[in-house]
Amino acid sequence: MNALRSEHISRRLWLAMLVIMLSVALISLPLIVSSYRSYQKSSEALQEIQSLKMVAELSNKISRERAPANNAMSSPQDELPEQLGALRKYRAEADIQMQQAAEVLRRTGFAGAARELEQNFKPALALGRQAVDRYIALPYGQRRQEQLDQAIASMFMAWDQSHAVLQHVVSQSKGKDTALSNYYTLILLLADLRDQAGRTASNIMAAVSFNEPIPEENLARFMQTQRQTQYLWQLVNVVQPEHDKTPEFQALHRRVKSGFLDQGLPLIAGLVDESLKGQPYSMTGPQLTQAIVGKFSTVVDLQSYILQYSVDAARQELQQAKKKLIYAILIVLVSLLTVVLTMIYARKWVFEPLIVARRQLFALAQLEDRPALESSRHRQGSSIFDAISRLQKKLQQREALEFQLKHIAHSDSLTGIANRFALDEYIKLLEKQPSQFKQTCLMIIDIDNFKQVNDRCGHIAGDWVIQAVAENLKSCVRASDLLVRYGGDEFLVLIENISQETALKVAEKIRKGVLASEILQCEELAEVNVSISAGVAVGAASWMALLARADEALFRAKAKGKNTVSD
């Protein structure tokens, strides 16, 4: 009987060897298929990012068309023929680039984006150009500031459509889920940054050209655009991975900082200040365009570098995927060969000796005392269960530690409320159901005169003020609402399912509570006049739209003289 059992075991071993070989074969196929799909995905990502590069360059081309258009609309009569010639030449180049972009989009599988380019962007650009041409055709004596401003706004709408095509390409791209995802985000950010840069000057172009005060609406747009430009600039530096911040990138980055942010924006801000003080402008419309174009070119240079760098990165990704596919095939072949040789070796030098050993142990077992064997088995089982119990305790301790670490990572150390990490997680949840944004209230709360607190009373007092505001926020909202410390002295409050009227009441309650805070009434802060200003927005199509609305409301609150709530 023992011999029969040994033969049975031998057959099972052969069967196990066959199962292992089949398992390796089954594992090998998915590995090769996965490597091939990665290679195919990298190839598609390269085509996609090349298409994205072309659309981004087209979007930039349309944004830059405002410069020759503004020159033609604001030039003196003796310079008009020359400026018209430059504008027509630029338009012809843009039209060729637009046709090429449409063809590339269709060829690379973005037929929807190509249709959007033809059906939405092209008509919008035509309308913008018509508005520019109608203004140029007006006799100089009949021209008005409002007409020039409307023509400039028409070109803004044309760029908005080109940016929509750019977003369409990104949303339909499969490569945005790969290691190249940062480049897709950067391309969108830089396209928006370039346009916002242009809008800073265009918002005041009409008033400067006619030497008239800048309208309040244009001033508000200028302030919003200026803030948006600074915000986008910060995002560009954050999104760009550290290992991709090459010396060339850093040099271009410094040029944008020194040329555009430190020189271009102050130049425009100076003209705005002249308007507010009722002083004559220090330059004309054409002079403004000429002075600012060079500053904008630094943004274009950085964008062009990122676009080319992203294409090069996609090519490298494709090469790496190709190497991985080749390595996967080689590894699978080597693995199969190794398994076969190992099985042959194991049969002869492992399994057969084990069968012999089993026979010997079986013979010895006949001589052992059965109660002793049962006692030994019981002790071994207890030892195993003890080990499992200890392992479970270790896992529970680790889970508790991970929970504590996650809580710390998502909380602001000074106030104990949520930080930006928690906000990002919350936004991700909302973006899974975009309709939620239409029912969500966002308050942006900014501490007035906070810099004076730090300057006059020290940073410890500044921390007291921040903590006092945070405590007041906790007492004024529900536990289910999200409180976020968004910046040094800036807080966000997100409330779901609330009306505009109720939201304003909550914001007013917060403002009054902060004003009456015992800490803010102390002698050290008496001369600073610490208070808060709040911008309230309820409902939007997306997070960025909701943030923009609340940001505009905060600007209006600040413009009213601070210590106020605006929607």
Image (cartoon, rainbow, N blue to C red):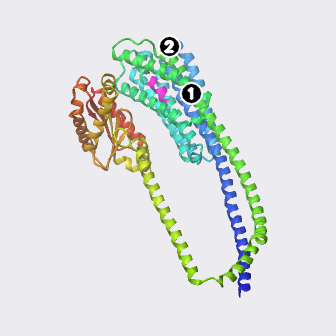
Q: Quadrant of the N terminus?
A: bottom right
Q: What residue is shown at x 28% (from left), y 32% (from top)?
A: 532
- Tell me: residue 434, above or below residue 266: below
Element type at mark 1: helix
- On screen, 46 above or below 524? below
Precedes in sequence: disc 1 or disc 2: 2
Q: Is residue 171 visible?
A: yes
Disc 1/disc 2 C-alpha distance (Å): 31 Å
Type of the residue with mark 2: Gln
Residue that mark 2 sits on: 77
The residue labelled by disc 1 is: 300
In percent of width and height, residue 115 lies at 56, 44
- Residue 164 has which mark? none
Q: Nearer the viewer, residue 175 or 351?
A: 351
Which label lies toward us, 1 or 2? 1
Q: Is residue 103 visible?
A: no
Residue at 79 percent of width and 71 percent of height: 348
Queried whether the magenta region covers residue 383, the answer comes back as: no
The relative height of residue 333 versus residue 59 in the rendered view (above or below) is: below
Residue 100, percent across and down? 64, 37
Indicate left or right for 353 with 187 as reference.
right
Please report the bounds of the magenta region as a residue range: 195-202
Query: What SS does tag 2 mark?
Result: helix
Q: Residue 311 location, x and y as percent? A: 64, 38
Residue 205, horizontal then vertical, whole percent: 44, 21
